[in-house]
Image (cartoon, rainbow, N blue to C red):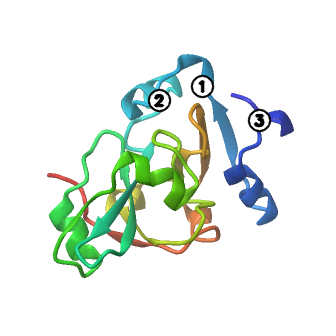
Amino acid sequence: MAKGKENKTNVMRVLDSLKLPYISHNYVESGTTVGMEVAKILHQDPKNVFKTLVTISGSKKHYVFLVPVCKELDLKKAAKSVGEKKIEMIKSKELLPLTGYIHGGCSPIGMKKFFTTTIDQSAKEIEHIFFSGGKIGFQVEMAFADLEKAISYQMADIVVD
């Protein structure tokens, strides 16, 4: 775990500016971007570690979804949750210009612009949520109750059963 200004990411600076408590976790030396491996490195239940997924709808609107790293996004459920007929994952090369983040380091906090964000309803059952700190090798842990002070979101059943 790294704490200190030398490892501050944009996500951490946003949380600092909002005066929201969090813990930063650094696993840069592992070199992994695989969610299940990240959960293991952090000694966390994979149900508490969330990945940030960016999609595009048939109407060309972008949506953000957070799901536990041990689950997969159900595109049909996700589309229904945002009132769209169909959504698909954006291409990896489109992620950086759209959000300011790269694949493996995408966070729901601090994107270039805000997109409708949906978090899987399983998050209701956790006290602390882990998600990308905005760079590969960094995770942020915070009270789930504090997340709504940083971003607007809705909750829905969006994972494959």
63 on left or right of 8: left
108 on left or right of 81: right
Q: Residue at x 79, y 57 (%)?
A: 16
User: Helix, strand or loop at disc 3?
Assistant: helix
Query: Which mark is drawn over residue 7?
Result: 3
Whether pointer 1 and pointer 2 mark residues with C-beta atoms closer than 8 Å, the reply is yes
Residue 87 coordinates in the image, percent (x, y): 23, 66
Q: Which residue is mark 2?
A: 38
How far apart marks 1 and 3 lie (CA) works out to 11 Å
| Disc 3 versus disc 2: nearer the observer | 3
Whether pointer 3 and pointer 2 mark residues with C-beta atoms closer than 8 Å, the reply is no
Residue 42 coordinates in the image, percent (x, y): 53, 28
User: Helix, strand or loop at disc 2?
Assistant: helix
Taking the view exactly as shown, the residue that stands out farthest to the top is: 29
Which picture quadrant has residue 133?
top right
Residue 78 coordinates in the image, percent (x, y): 25, 66
Q: Amino acid at mark 1?
A: Tyr
Q: Amino acid at mark 2?
A: Val
Q: Amino acid at mark 3?
A: Asn
Q: Which residue is mark 1?
A: 27
Which picture quadrant has residue 23?
top right
Which picture quadrant has residue 45?
top left
Identify the mark nearer the N-term, 1 or 3: 3
